[in-house]
Image (cartoon, coloured by chain):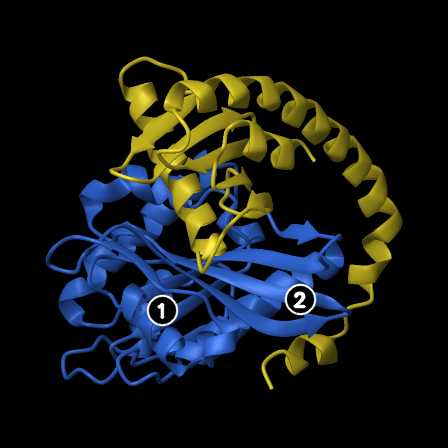
Chain colours: A blue, B yellow
Amino acid sequence: MTFINYASREINCKIVYYGPGLCGKTTNLQYIYDSTAPQAKGKLISLATETDRTLFFDFMPLELGTVRGFKTRFHLYTVPGQVYYDASRKLILKGVDGVVFVADSQDERMDANIESLYNLEENLQTQGYDLKQLPYVLQLNKRDLPNVTPIEELTGELTRKGEPVFEAVATDGTGVFDTLKAVAKQVLTELRKS
Amino acid sequence: MVLARLCVECASRVVFLVDRDGQTIAFHGDIGDMDTMSFSSLAAGNVAATSSMAKLIGEDVFPAVVHEGERESIFISVIGRSLLVVVFDERSTLGLVKLRTKKASFEVASILDEAVRDSTTFSMNNSSVFAEITDEDIDSLFG
């Protein structure tokens, strides 16, 4: 739920990056963090294991500017991708305004993508959301690797409602900001409707 | 006002009121160079995790969470959809913080109830602010 503070004239929105383990969710956030001016961002908080796998979530606040006199801030979260961290994923979806599903384009990760997407739909439902009603973007990551599934096949399996789809290489930033911009636009458009 | 009083009464460093989704609603006290947004997000994550743990052992919710450090400590009291978070050091004690926070939490709960009622009326009257957002406004955010 978008948090609007009329007193300080701020709009705060929560965007969650979801997807299977090692698909590049944290890398998306890391790239955004590294490429953003210091005054526009807060700290990048990573609750990770000793081997740098996300344990609970990554978090960074990102200030984009003002709309109609309201300072617009996006709180970007990632979830832990590994299957056994499902309880944590459910918690992070609370209060979500928009979701980015980061799919791993490698052939051998297709099943993991499908499983994770079903898990997203299920977990959204338990929090009272419907993916079809929520601002949502699909990112097809790791397009630079040699063993990738063709785009048509990935979109055939993973699109849900004609959502925007972006090819990405999060390690070099390709598609990272396009993805963020697309989901942020949808969130603000929803705000206008409400 | 309630936060300011609680801060003094607890001899605490800073008191936060945080939404359970991790948004800072208000704070009072010395934040120094503390990153308040990250702090609120982590406090909410912390309570979300401990509430889930509570359910796993048959409790509905842990109404309070305490973290005691060598110098600084944190006391979190759950008030409906919000969290009252007190950061204190050796100048105060956990007993005092608990006692004062319990009293303040009733006042905070009643203020929050009132705020929810007011905000419904307020947002009905102010919805046009956001209805007027244009595609150009949104595009301008991304340069």
Which residue appears at 67% of the width and 82% of the height? B140
Front residue of B86 and B76: B86
Which residue appears at 38% of the width and 74% of the height? A33
Toward the top, the furthest residue is B58
Who comes first in sequence, dot 2 or dot 1? 1
Residue B81 in view (yes/no)? no
Secondary structure beneath disc 1? Answer: helix
Front residue of A131 and A59: A59
Residue A110 location (% of width, % of height): 21, 63
In the image: residue A138, left or right of residue A104:
right
Residue A135 in view (yes/no)? yes
Which residue appears at 47% of the width and 47% of the height? B40
Q: Is residue A57 above or below residue B5?
A: below
Residue A186 location (% of width, % of height): 60, 65
Name the image quarter holding residue B18.
Answer: top right
Amino acid type at mark 2: Lys
Residue A43 location (% of width, % of height): 39, 65
Secondary structure beneath disc 2? Answer: strand
Q: Is residue B36 above or below residue B71?
A: below
In the image: residue A29, left or right of residue B119:
left
Q: Which residue is mark 2?
A: A71
Q: Which residue is mark 1?
A: A29
